[in-house]
Image (cartoon, helix red, strand yellow):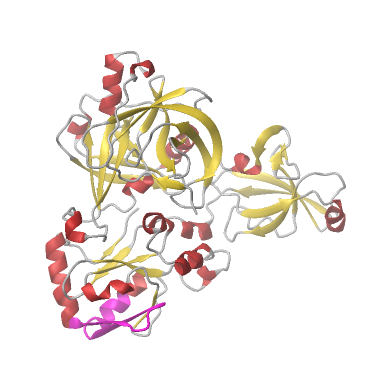
Amino acid sequence: MNKFWILRAGLILIFSIPVFSQTNGNSDLKTLLNGVVIVRSDIYPDATDPLEFGDQDLSRDVGSGFIIAGNRILTNAHVISESKYLKVKRFNSSKYYNAKVEFIGFDCDLALISVEDEEFFSGVEPLEITEESPSLGSNLLMLGYPEGAENLTLENGLVNRVERLRYSFTGLDYRKVIRVGANILPGYSGGPAIQNGKVAGIIFEVSQIQGNTAYLIPPEVVQHFLKDIQDGQYDGFPFVGFTFQNGNSESVKKYLGVPQNLQGVLVNKVYPNSSFSDVLQTDDFLYKVDEAYLNNEGGLLEFSGRTIVDLIEPGFVGQKLTLYFYRNGKNFKIQAELKKTDSLELYRDRQIRSFLGGGLLFQPVNRALFGKESQRVETALRYHYSYFIQDDLFKFTERDLILTTIFPDPLNSKYLNYRFKILESINGKTPANIAEFKDYWKKYSNGTLVLKFRGVGLPLVLDAKTVRTIDLRVRKRFDIKSDESKEGK
């Protein structure tokens, strides 16, 4: 079980008294407060009444963000990842402004949003981000907005550890994090942690099992994200792209023709279309990357505590590295270019795609969905998705499709038992992706739609008249004017 909560919306307000130790007085505090914003991320404009929708979870996520240079706002990717209607508001203001997502980094849980109306930024001094993580034992001032409250929340925190952990949003990416002792609750997501008047981290997770423990995205990761988007697109963090085992066995080295006492690691598997898929092979003995020699555990000999991951991850897509390795007794020196690992992008929400028809919302399976609906998604589906790459299931279908939401209507309320089930076929056809599913739906919706789901004996059957009736009511009620298919960045 994942031991972290992504800091989604909460209901509790906490005000911390000793805040001035982090600032130079009232003027500096006012600058900080003016720079922190509340972010409301709605899926549909009228889906705001929890009594109306029960547990359908159609309404909104609420998080925090802060203004940086260039009239831009930084927040967490998980705050806005499912948004169709995005709004932001400044501290002590009653007016919300429409916003849009400019860049989103699922692999680092960061997003950059913009507001077209320049009035929003009037009189605001942007917050500056430090280059390095705060030191152990140092103090931070943490700011954010809990859900349902217009008041900004302040809390003191103490840096008690800097480590590498899996980021909960994707469940895939291990990155540097800052662990802080602080009474942080859901709703702070995207808020800044301030030290000496500058942003020294972004709040994004809270521990489920450790009381008063929160986690920050470190400034090094934030700076990498901001530098990456300077060319107008987000390429993401490079991934090592292969698995390895330790190189302790001298008998294995002898069998492979590797010089005795040479330290390094033995390559087990190379991910398809990764940075080194055209260079490395299974059973290669990798001992050096650029000028850094490896030890038998994958660490860097001359840099205590750092690993091959620490060497590759700070790089950028397109950057070149030189690999030194032995294969079949021969020594190789080959240059490789860092790039995204396409197959692993299936584990990240690169695009927010869905299809709405007959009041039924279908979506490709993704880890963000698991994080939000983990108690509702059946174990078989989670297991199937976890091994989508390892078992090469991506060769057969782009992504499993599931019915995630049933818009309340008298004609479709009987289909609740199909929710969160994998779609097997539509009128006997198995769609490879959401676009193909949309085509099949339109092809057969003039007659009778027959949808079969894994684990449900009877198919879901909809006739053309029912589909048209529900579509008209749902679109009118939720002000859906575009077609059913939606794509986001």
> In the visual, does 450 lie left or right of 336?
left
Does 415 sit above or below residue 291? below
Residue in the foreground of this view, choosing between 361 and 235: 361
Q: Position of residue 260 (x, y in %)?
A: 87, 47
Q: Position of residue 237 (x, y in %)?
A: 51, 45
Which image quarter: residue 211? top left
Does 344 sit above or below residue 26? below
The residue at 16%/62% (across/down) is 481
How many marks are shown on the rendered structure? 0
Residue 234 in view: no
Which image quarter: residue 208? top left
Residue in the foreground of this view, choosing between 455 and 318: 455
Q: Is residue 25 magenta?
A: no
Does 338 sit above or below residue 183? below
> In the visual, does 7 lie left or right of 411?
right
Residue 76 in view: yes
Residue in the foreground of this view, choosing between 177 and 16: 16
Q: Position of residue 22 (x, y in %)?
A: 38, 19
The residue at 45%/41% (across/down) is 228
Q: Which residues are magenta?
A: 439-464
The residue at 30%/43% (across/down) is 10
> In the visual, does 5 lie left or right of 174?
left
